Image: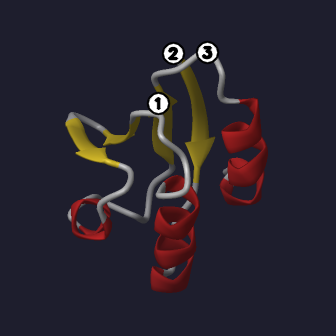
């Protein structure tokens, strides 16, 4: 498992983030405090507190391309 911190403070960035994650087969979760949602679910993401940094957890060792795609969202 690998994890990074991201920021998704605007609705447009949430949409871009979901579009990126949907292109990868890995299981990707998004955490905010005690809440965890599927990072490919736009409704799930909007249920989180987006004013705070979020943690992305990727459950795959082969995720370098995905991590590079997510760099623009890093907090």
Instruction: Give the number of the mark in front: 2 or 3.
Output: 3
The residue singled out by tag 2 in the image is 1
Q: Residue at x 43, y 64 (%)?
A: 51
The residue singled out by tag 3 in the image is 61
Q: How many marks?
A: 3
Callout 1 touching callout 2 (CB < 8 Å): yes
Crowdedness of circle 2 by 10 Å Cα count: few (<14), some, many (20+)? few
Q: What separation in Å lies between label 2 and label 3 (alpha carbons)? A: 7 Å
Nearest the viewer among 59 and 57 is 59
- As helix, strand or loop, the secondary structure at mark 2 comes to loop
Residue 67 picture quarter? top right
Callout 2 touching callout 3 (CB < 8 Å): no
Could you tell me residue 47's position as x and y percent? Answer: 20, 64
Nearest the viewer among 41 and 47 is 41
Crowdedness of circle 1 by 10 Å Cα count: few (<14), some, many (20+)? some
Q: Is residue 60 above or below residue 9?
A: above
């Amino acid at each position: 498992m690998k994890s990074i911190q991201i920021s998704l403070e605007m609705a447009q960035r949430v949409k871009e983030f979901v579009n990126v994650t949907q292109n990868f087969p890995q299981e990707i979760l998004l955490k905010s405090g005690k809440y965890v949602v599927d990072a490919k679910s736009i409704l799930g993401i909007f249920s989180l507190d987006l004013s705070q940094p979020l943690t992305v957890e990727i459950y795959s060792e082969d995720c370098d391309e995905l991590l590079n795609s997510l760099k623009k969202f890093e907090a």
